[in-house]
Amino acid sequence: MKKVLAGLLLFFLLPVVVQAEDYTYTTNLDNTITITRYTGSGGAVTITNTIEGLPVTSIGNSAFYNRSLTSVTIPDSVTSIGTWAFAHCYGLTSVIIPDSVTSIGGDAFAHCISLNTITVDDLNSVYSSTNGVLFDKNQTTLIRYPEGKAGSYTIPSSVTNIGGTAFSNCTSLTSIIIPDNVTDLPPCVDPVSKLGFGRSQLFEQPAIGQYWEVQVVEPP
């Protein structure tokens, strides 16, 4: 009998997925909404800030995975973006992140091959952006370089850490200049010689086998 009651209690505690307009969602215990899936037609999407009168505070894991988006504006009710939330949105070119977002899951924008701009509101206390590139607030960590952004790139001198997938799948990127004060590199950055942090290094993209020329800038 106790097992039956425990099972019923667990059932009622599980979030119920509901469909509303272009989204499926769950209602959290604090009466906020997590979007679990986008079911709309795509294009330029401004995500709703309320569903059924409750604030949308979370974009769930893979919620917009492989949808036909061209641009996304996230409302200032949202505080968290889940893992792979916008992954494989091949036509997505730009993302606007409001000041309210304090958590972005791993690979949230992975395989967005057309993405060339990530814009973070200046008032955000955790994240920032410069020239379309995603950083932490103090710009000491480069979190994500948009995969569709072409040409060469000079990492700002404030950066000391490059995220593990910061340059993953950036096939349009031709070269990177790394400032000397960068002390933490992804494991796929290998020196040409045994000198370690030498002037010339290659940045390897294991999934494609592509190499970029990388220059390490030493102080004068």
Image (cartoon, rainbow, N blue to C red):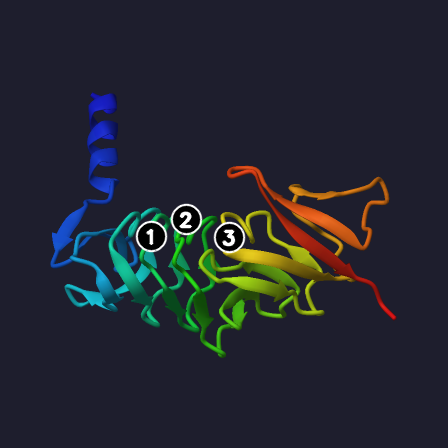
Question: Which one is in front, 62 or 174?
Answer: 174
For numbered disc 2, what is the local secondary structure?
A: loop
Q: CA distance from mark 3 to mark 2?
A: 9 Å
Question: Which one is in front, 59 or 183?
Answer: 183
> Which quadrant of the view contains residue 80?
bottom left
Q: Is residue 180 left or right of residue 22?
A: right
In the picture of the structure, the residue carrying the numbered disc 3 is 170
Question: Which one is in front, 36 or 181?
Answer: 181
In the picture of the structure, the residue carrying the numbered disc 1 is 90
Q: Residues within 10 Å of mark 2 (few under 14, many from 20)?
A: many
> Which quadrant of the view contains residue 100?
bottom left
* Residue 37 percent coordinates (x, y): 24, 50
Pointers 3 and 1 in contact (CB under 8 A)? no
Task: Give the number of marks.
Answer: 3
> Which one is closest to the eye, mark 3 or mark 2?
3
Q: CA distance from mark 3 to mark 1?
A: 13 Å
Question: Which one is in front, 150 or 167?
Answer: 150
For numbered disc 3, what is the local secondary structure?
A: loop
- Which one is earlier in the sequence, the residue at label 2 or at label 1? 1
For numbered disc 1, what is the local secondary structure?
A: loop
Q: CA distance from mark 2 to mark 1?
A: 7 Å
Q: Residues within 10 Å of mark 1 (few under 14, many from 20)?
A: many
Three-letter residue code for mark 2 = His
* Residue 117 percent coordinates (x, y): 44, 67
Q: Which mark, by number, is residue 194?
A: none
Q: Quadrant of the N terminus?
A: top left
In the picture of the structure, the residue carrying the numbered disc 2 is 111
Pointers 2 and 1 in contact (CB under 8 A)? yes
Which residue does the image show at 60% across and 52% down from the upper left?
163
Three-letter residue code for mark 1 = Tyr
* Residue 113 percent coordinates (x, y): 40, 53
